[in-house]
Image (spheres, rainbow, N blue to C red):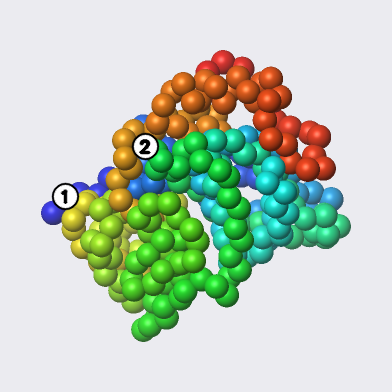
Amino acid sequence: MNAPLVIRPRPEEVEGQPILRPLPSAKCRSVGPFVFFDHMLHTRYPAGHGMNIRQHPHIGLSTLTYLFEGELLHKDSLGSEQVVKAGDVSWMTAGSAIAHVERTPAELWDQDFTMHGLQIWLASPKEHEQGPGLYSHHPAASLPVSDNLGVTIRMIAGTGFCLESPVPVLSPTLYAELQLQTATTLLIPTEHTERALYILSGDALLNDQPIEAHALVILPSGEAMTLFADSDCHAILFGGAPMDGPRRINWNFVASDPTAIEDARRRWAAGDWPSVPGESERIELPKGRG
């Protein structure tokens, strides 16, 4: 058996929201189509405070926001406007050019509230990199769930464990929320070529080896693994088919062709970009190449 690769995430902050970012890493650039993984840490906001991520662009990827607690307002240049609640999936495919805004809904600014969730990016297959943008919202009740012998699996996107999410992924994908009660076991099958496990909370063993909370574990390809909960355990399992070639990530842009990124940087800097209706503020292009 090959030893899993363990990645410890780096702490960051996005508009006042503390996060952990295990992907991308120098040790691992992608897992299936997943090229970016942000864990928005459990944060208590007092009244008068919240998130306000101003208008910013994307190409060549899909963003997926999934909250455990709290709410976010999503607005984009397609005209979408949607409050995303805990357990919902907010799915946005950028195509050749999209802009969006994410902020705490106005009604929550006047009260204390808690934020906790995930935002990930999935690289689009080459044939979809320059396609049209798309937004879809999937309420919590629409996501399939398996609940058996103390193990609950919710399929956020893609397929696995005989479940299929309604989220319109563009390539074979696995993105599942796992909740294991103390002393329960889950066999992680090999139905997806690339897989990774992220422990949100709790104590767990993977093939009898302890896993730290907030560690990203890249599972060996082709090997079934056994996850055992030493205490109540909350985790994310994700992956899918290998991408159709390497991707370059530059700021908010993902592409297989570097010239597409250069063009996107030029267009955003020049203001030649679709805008979010009703929004005037935007995040400017960072200086340099990053």
Most foreground residue, 15 or 122: 122
Query: What residue is shown with label 2?
Result: 29
The image position of residue 165, as x and y in percent, is: 46, 67
Disc 2 marks which amino acid? Arg
Looking at the image, which residue is at 37% across and 65% down? 159
Looking at the image, which residue is at 67% across and 30% down? 273
The image position of residue 262, as x and y in percent, is: 52, 20
- Position of 104 relative to 11 (above/below): below
- Left or right: residue 195 compared with residue 207: right
- Left or right: residue 26 compared with residue 91: left
Q: Residue furthest top?
A: 288
Looking at the image, which residue is at 49% across and 36% down? 130
The image position of residue 245, as x and y in percent, is: 31, 35
Cα distance between the residues tagged 2 and 1: 19 Å
- Position of 141 relative to 46 (above/below): below
Q: Residue furthest bottom?
A: 149
Residue 2 shows which numbered tag?
1
Disc 1 marks which amino acid? Asn
